[in-house]
Image (tube, rainbow, N blue to C red):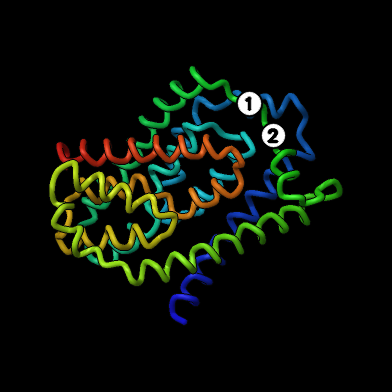
Amino acid sequence: MEILLDTLIDSLKLFPFLFATYLCLEYIEHKTSDKTAEIIKKAGWSGPLVGSLCGALPQCGFSVVAANFFAARVIGIGTLLAIFLSTSDEMLPIMISGAVPPLLITQIVLYKIVCGILFGYLVTFAWNKYQPRPHINIEQLCAAENCHCETSILKPALYHSIRITLFIFIFTLLLNYAMSYLNLSILTDYMRIPLVGELISGLIGLIPNCSSSVILTQLYMENYISIGSLLSGSLVGGGVGLLVLFRVNRRFKENLKIVAILYICGVLGGLFSRLIF
C-alpha cells in the first residue's frame, strides 16, 4: 500500500505539467499561423541553453514537457538532451535534507547545467547535419492519440494528460515493486572503480523513475560511490521523461538513438567530473 500510495502521488504531481504542455501544444495547432510555426522551428539556437536552465529545477516535470514538445517537433534534439542532462529529479531534495554542504550542491547543479548546454549544442550540430529535422507535426501527435481535437483545446489537452498520467502510473507502479526487491550492495564494490562505476551508474540512471536518483544519491551520501558515479547516473536520469518520450514519440529507432546518446553523454560527464571535484 505504501508503494501504491507513493506511486499515485508521484504520478498526480506530473499531471499539471502534462496538462500545461498539451494546452500549449493545442494552442500552437489551433491558433498559430504557418509563419509562427516556422519561427518556432527556426528559433532553436538558444534551446539547449534555456532547456538546461529549466531542467535544473528540482523535479522531473520539465523532462515530461520536453518529451512531448520533441514528439511534436516544437523543440530539437539538443534542447531535449539538455533538459534530460540537467534534470536532477529527487537528488536535490535528498541532498538538502541530508545536510550536504550548500557549496557542493551548487557546484553539482552548475556542472549539470554546463553539461546540458555543451552536449546539447554538440548534439544539435551533429544531429541536424546528418538527419534533417522534419516539420512540426502536432497534428500527427493528436491523430496517433485519437483525441478528436477539432473543436477546442481544453478537452483534447485533458484527454492527452489523463492518458499519459495513467500510463506513467501503471508502469511506475510495476517498476517500484521491482525496485523494492533489488539489492544494489553487490554492485557497490564495482561502482567504486573508475569508468566501471560511471558505466553502471549510467545504466541505473536510465531507469525511468525517481527510484534511480534516490538510490544513487543515498549511495553517494553514505560514501559507497564516487561523485563521478553519482553524476553519471544523475546526468542520464531524466525522471519519467524517457518513459513519456517512448509513449508519445512513435519513432522507436529515433528514441533508441536518443537513449544511446544520453547514456554516452552521462558517462563522459561523470568521468570528467573526477578531474573537477
Q: Residues within 10 Å of mark 2 (few under 14, many from 20)?
A: some
Query: Visible in this render: residue 276?
Result: yes
- Residue 179 versus residue 235 in the image, above or below: below
Residue 190 screen position, x and y as percent: 15, 53
In the image, 188 versus 270, the foreground residue is 188
Residue 159 screen position, x and y as percent: 72, 58
Q: Are marks 2 and 1 in contact (CB under 8 Å)?
A: yes
Q: Which residue is mark 1?
A: 134
Identify residue type, mark 1: Pro
Question: Residue visible at 71% across and 45% down?
Answer: 144
In three-dimensional space, the C-alpha distance between marks 2 and 1, rounded to whole angstroms, equals 8 Å
Residue 140 screen position, x and y as percent: 72, 38
Which residue is outermost to the right? Answer: 151
Q: Secondary structure at mark 2?
A: loop
Task: Residue 275: name its quadrant.
Answer: top left
Q: Secondary structure at mark 1?
A: loop
Question: Residue visible at 76% across and 26% down?
Answer: 34
Identify residue type, mark 2: Asn
Label total for image: 2
Which residue is outermost to the bottom? Answer: 1
Q: Which residue is mark 2?
A: 137
Residue 236 screen position, x and y as percent: 36, 45
Which residue is outermost to the top? Answer: 129
Task: Residue 12: name its quadrant.
Answer: bottom right
